[in-house]
Amino acid sequence: MDKSLEKSLLVWLKAQKKACGLFLKLSLWLGMISAVAMVAQAYIIATILDGVIMGQQVIPLTDNAQIVSSSVSIDTYTPHLIALIALMLLRALLAYGRERASFEAGKRLRGHIRAAVMDKLTKLGPAFIKGKPAGSWASIVLEQVEDLQDFYARYLPQISLAGFIPVLILAAVFPINWAAGLILLLTAPLIPMFMILVGMGAADANRKNFSALARLSGHFMDRLKGLSTLKLFHRGDAELKVIATASEEFRSRTMSVLRMAFLSSAVLEFFAAVSIAVLAVYFGFSYLGHLDFGYYGAHANISSSTVPQIVGIPFSLFTGLFILILAPEFYQPLRDMGTHYHAKAQAVGAAEALITLLEHPEPEFVGQVRINSIETLSADNLEVFSVDGTRLLGPLSFELKDNQRLALVGPSGAGKTSLLNALLGFLPYKGHLLINGHELSALDLAHWRQHLAWLGQEPQLFHGTVRDNVALAAPTLPDDRLWNLLAEANISDFVKAQPLGLDAPVGEQSSGLSVGQAQRIALARALGQKASLFVLDEPTASLDSQSEQAVSSALNRAMTGKMCIMVTHRLDQLDQMDTILVLDKGLIVQRGDFTTLSNTHGLFQTLLRENIESVADIELVPLSVSGSDTQLDSDAPLDSAAEPTKGDAQ
């Protein structure tokens, strides 16, 4: 990864730590207090061991003198033992508090980032979201945000502790032995230096690993959703091989990241062990009398040539024990930082995808104007663009007044859905798109959307109950109102037939419901918004003939006296539309009513002829909306297969 890019990603990551609140600082302060307690604990342990092992022995200053010692009562060290137990309990409590504070800091950060991602996706809208498989978005929202946890919970506090704890230990060691302090000071930089050298490629490897994971997640989820179609066309074995190849690639990338992690850990352990061994060798030779430097005062000159007036020098293991107990703790923060360095590499890899999303340009709708109803809707030289600036539609002009219905028809890719997305505020535009004379970009989008009822070709129901889905926009709707909406959508008989009624469960991705049932529940939800404008994107495209007639009849009743814009390929059903716009390659090539266009040579007549021929090949089953056929559908259980399920239709 480019160094400037990695640096900018780290700056962004550190700028997000304010979302952690006070918990990040609390974790750091608890770690510092624990470090002070650790030094005090080492002091007490060294004092107790020295007293128990050595007593009060004195090194003689003449070669033929004997070592003098005296016994020490265990009662002398009772206060030390009590203090040691207290310090152990204190450090345990501090470690627990630090873990909880660190987790809470990471939890708050993850919640903040996920909220930002979801808000951004909401602003970018479905036109942008459909550009990637659902599995890729799931990877960003779940796995990649989750990988930020250890960066904030462990790596950032450890960076500060890796500087504080070694300085604290050096401050305790140098006053009693400058040689030991010098050994610690000179060997300390080896660990972070080799950690950086070994871990230079970790961030790049993690970034590639995240990309592979996102591709694999999207690929797998797409195949899972289309499993019935794959089986139908005998592509199951072929897709198994493709998934196996993608999984093997991901396994290989994951193992390369783990290889770096183990290599880094081995390097850290090696240099820490070597540094501690150097200290142990120094003190061993100094106690054997072969090294006589490093101490201060009389201890620095232990030999037979010492001034004879001095009877002897008290011999003590305290210095060696104290420093050797602290030595592992001196390197431990640096080793922990090396361990958590991979959390940094993971976070950098995840941050690249998150920043790309969060900094993606979005439609500039910052207006505050609110309207009470929709009386006119007009476009003048309107051009619609994708979020990355590619022109999708236009220029075109049209006008729609209250109680009028407008149909958008044309071949696939003509720009019909792009126009609807611009009208919903999900795509940027140039020119004029006026609502009651106000530019759409000047309107309060949230308030504007309250005047709209949207129904697409793929009904989106959420895990929960029928009540939850119908009352999504207004959770306080009473039951009688919900039943009225279901009746208007020709689905009330089906819901009443369920044992739980309105509380009948709805699975993820409308599982357990047929496409027609899911579409009519989605229609009931749309009807509950008391909309002035119906925005319909091929609402009957995936339905069988019975469900299509049920949905169409419900829409016709609901749109009485309302404004409507509909995209459809069923041209034989447009006789009730006031105006039809025929689009091709983003431009209006024809306009008029059904009678005029069907008798005029042009694209509409060609599409109409093709549409009628395709319908003639299908055996239509008549539907009596209030008759036995409807009863057959409504009596079916919620997980029935009376018509193809949503997954099969896809």
Image (spheres, grey):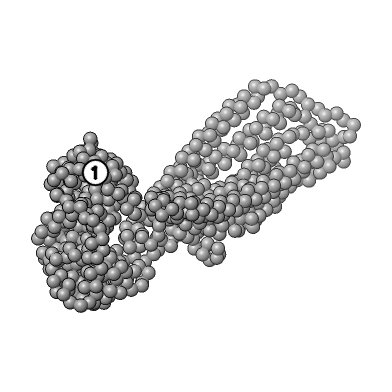
Residue sitting at 32 percent across and 72 percent down? 392
Instruction: Give 489 or 32, whichever is nearer the viewer.
Output: 489
Residue 15 in sight in this render: no
In percent of width and height, residue 638 lies at 26, 41
Give the class, few, some or many, for how many residues have Cα within 10 Å of label 1's Cα (few <14, many ≥20). Answer: many
Residue sitting at 15 percent across and 53 percent down? 554
In percent of width and height, residue 286 lies at 79, 41
Instruction: Give 304 or 361, whichever is nearer the viewer.
Output: 361
Left or right of 164? Residue 19 is left
In percent of width and height, residue 87 lies at 56, 33
Tell me the quarter of the picture where residue 309 sits: top right
Residue type of the residue flagged with mark 1: Val
Residue underneath mark 1: 466
Instruction: Give 10 or 309, whichever is nearer the viewer.
Output: 10
Left or right of 160? Residue 172 is right
Residue 89 in sight in this render: yes
Which residue appears farthest toward the right when viewing the image? 64
